[in-house]
Amino acid sequence: MLKGRNGETIRLTMAQAVVKYLQVQFSQRDERIRRFIPAIFGIFGHGNVAGLGQALYEYGGDLPYYQPCNEQSMVHTASGFAKANYRLATMACTSSIGPGATNMVTGAATATINRLPVLLLVSDYYATRYQGPVLQQLEHPISADVSVNDCLRPVSRFFDRISRPEQLLTALPEAMRVLTDPVETGAVTLSLPQDVQAHAYDYPIAFFEKKIWRIDRQIPSPERIKEAVSLLKEAKRPMLIAGGGIHYSEAWESLKNFSEELGIPVGETFAGKGALRQESVLGLGGFGVTGNPCAGEIANQSDLLISVGTRLTDFSTGSQSAFNHPGVNFISINVCSHDAHKQGAIPILADARKGLDKLLQAARSSGVKSNSSYVKEISSVKQKWQNQVNNEIFQQVSGEAMSQGQLIGVLNEEAKEGDTIVAAAGNPPGDLLKLWEATGGRNCHLEFGNSCMGYEIPAGLGVRMAQPDGEVYVFVGDGTYLMNPMELLTAVQENLKITVVISENHGYQCIRSLQVAKAGHSFGNEFRARQNETNRLEAEFLQIDFAHNAQSLGAKACHVYTPGEFREALREARKNHQTCVIVVETEKYRMLPGSGVWWDVAVAEVSNDPEIQKRREEYETERRKLQKFHY
C-alpha cells in the first residue's frame, strides 16, 4: 500500500514496475501536457504472458491493451500514432522471445529512420541460465549473452537488457529521455528476460510519481541568424525545402509568414507534405525525385536553398543533382546538428518554429523584401504544371483503365477538412507527393524514410487512434496490400474505422517501371503465372479477389472500375462506421510525368545486351552532370 515518499518502497515484480511507471509518464510542449504512452500493443507468448501479461492484468488499468495480428504491425501502428501526435505521444509494444522479437526489427528500423518514438518491450532468454537453452533461444557459438534481440541494437536509438529488476531505475528514465528528445528519438528497446520479468524488488515509491518530460523549443544562435541573413540579402532566387520538422514543431503559421513576407517558394519533402496548410502562389508542393516538375525547375536555378526540418536524403537532393546554380548556398534550420551541417549549410540549430520566426524577424530588420518578378515567375511555372494535371493527368485515356492519377484526383475532390491519407511504398507516396491537395485541413501522412511496404494499414490504425474524427484513407497498391492485410481484423476488433483504397495494377508496377528503364526488361515484378517455355513468371495475369479477402477479415469491401464508381464508393464509405476496402482497377503501365530531378540508380557497367549498353551510356552522361558535393 502506498503511504508516502520518504524512503518508502513497494514490492513489485519487474514487469509490474514497468507497467506502473509507464502510466505516470507525460510529455509537455508549450502549455500542453499529455500522456506520453497511453496504451500498449502486444502479442503474448511464453516469454511475456506470465510477466508483462500478468502485470497488465493486475496493474494496467490506465494502460489499455490492444491485440494486433503481427508484431511488425504493432510497431507501425505506434509509429503512425506518434507521427499523428507530432512525436508528443506514442505506444508501447510487447512481444515474446524469438520470432516475436525479430518480427519487430523492420518496424523498429522504420521508426528510427523516420525519427518516430516507439517503445519496444521484448522478452528474452532466462537470465539465470540454469534451465539450459530455452525455447526460441539463439545459441551463439562465442557469445553466451547474445540473443535474437540483439538484432534490434542497430535499429534502436537506445537498447538495454534488464538482467536484474533494479536496473529499471536507470533504464526506464533513460528510455523516456531518448523517446522525448527530438534529436535522439526513434525506437527504444528494453530487452526483458522472461524470468526477470517475474522477479520482485522493493522499488522506491517516488519512482512511480507523475513525471513530466518537457520538450523545449531550442532557440537559434544570434550569430548564425546574422550569417543567414547575409545570404538572404544577396539571394535573387531563394527557395525553402520544408521537411517533417515543420509538422513536429507545429510551425505551419511560421512557415507561411516567412514564405509570404519574403516571397520565397516552398517545396515539400515526403515527411513535409502539407507543411503549407493554406493555398499559396508560393507553394510548389512536392519536391524531389518524385515531386512536381515545377518544384524541380525552381530548385535547379535557386541560388539559396533554405532547408527546414529535413534530413535531405537522395530523393530530395536528386542524388546531389537537384541544385545547379553555380553560386548556390545553403541554410539549414534543424534541431539535429548532423542534419543542420549537410550540404555545407549555415547551420541554425533550432526548433523549426523558433528558427523561422527569428530568421524572419532579422531579415525584416535588414530590409530583405519579396521580389515581385520572381513571385510572378513562380506563379507561371506553377500554372503550367496545374494545366498539365487538369488537362492530361486527370483525364481518361481511351482504351485504358482508370489511371492512378485519376484515382487521386477523385480522392482530392471527395476529401474534406480533417481527413488524412496514409501511404508508404511503391507509386502511392510519390503520386500523392505530386497530386494530393494537402490544404484546407486535409492531412497527408507519407512514410518514405524506409519506404516500408506493409506499414500503411497498421499506421492507419495509429492515425485513427490519434484522430477520432474525419476519414482515414489508407492508399496502397495490390502488392503492398498482400504484405500486411491482417490488421484489417484489428481495425474491426477495436472499431478503428479506416478506408483502404487498393490500386489494383496487377503487380509491383512502380519497381517494374524502374526496372524497364534501367535494365531494359521486365522480370519478376508482376502477378503472373509461370510460363513453361521460359520458366519465368511471364504467363497470364493471376486473378486475385482482394475484395473478398478483405471481407473475410470483417471489412466492407467492393471493386470499382470507373471514376464515377470510385466516387460513389468513397461517399458510401464515409457514411459507414465499419472499416471499408475499395479495390480500384487501375492502368498497369501509365505513370505520372517525371519531376525532372535525377535519381542515381546505377545501370550494369558490363553487359552483352545492346539495350543495357545504351542505358549505361545514358547513365554515364547524366552522372557527369552532377553538381559537386557541397561541403
Image (spheres, grey):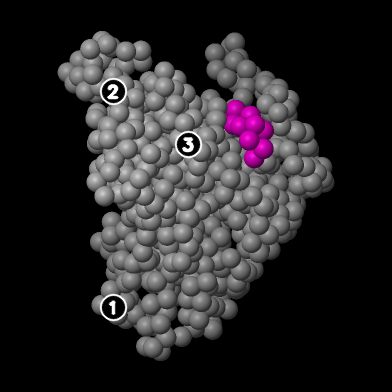
Q: Earlier in the sequence, mark 1 or mark 3?
A: 3
Q: Is residue 198 visible?
A: yes
Is 489 within the magenta?
A: yes
Q: Residue at x 46, y 59 (%)?
A: 33
Which quarter of the rendered picture does the C terminus lie within? bottom left
> Residue type at mark 3?
Gly
Q: Secondary structure at mark 1?
A: helix
Using the image as rendered, state which of residue 90 and residue 140 is in the foreground: 90
For the residues marked 2 and 3, what is the alpha-carbon distance in whole angstroms?
28 Å
Q: Secondary structure at mark 2?
A: loop
Mark 2, residue position: 147
Is 620 within the magenta?
A: no
On residue 60, the disc is: 3
Vertically, is 214 above or below 561? below
Using the image as rendered, state which of residue 326 and residue 631 is in the foreground: 631
Count neighbours of disc 2 (C-alpha within 10 A) and say few if under 14, some if 14 to 19, many if 20 or more.
some
On residue 92, the disc is: none
For residue 278, side relative to residue 331 (left or right): right
Which quarter of the rendered picture does the N terminus lie within? top left
Count neighbours of disc 3 (C-alpha within 10 A) and say few if under 14, some if 14 to 19, many if 20 or more.
many
Mark 1, residue position: 222
Residue 168 image point, x, y percent: 28, 38
Foreground mark, 1 or 3? Answer: 3
The range drawn in magenta is 484-496
Foreground mark, 1 or 2? Answer: 2
Q: Residue furthest left?
A: 142
Pointers 1 and 3 in contact (C-beta within 8 Å): no
Foreground mark, 2 or 3? Answer: 3
> Residue type at mark 2?
Ser
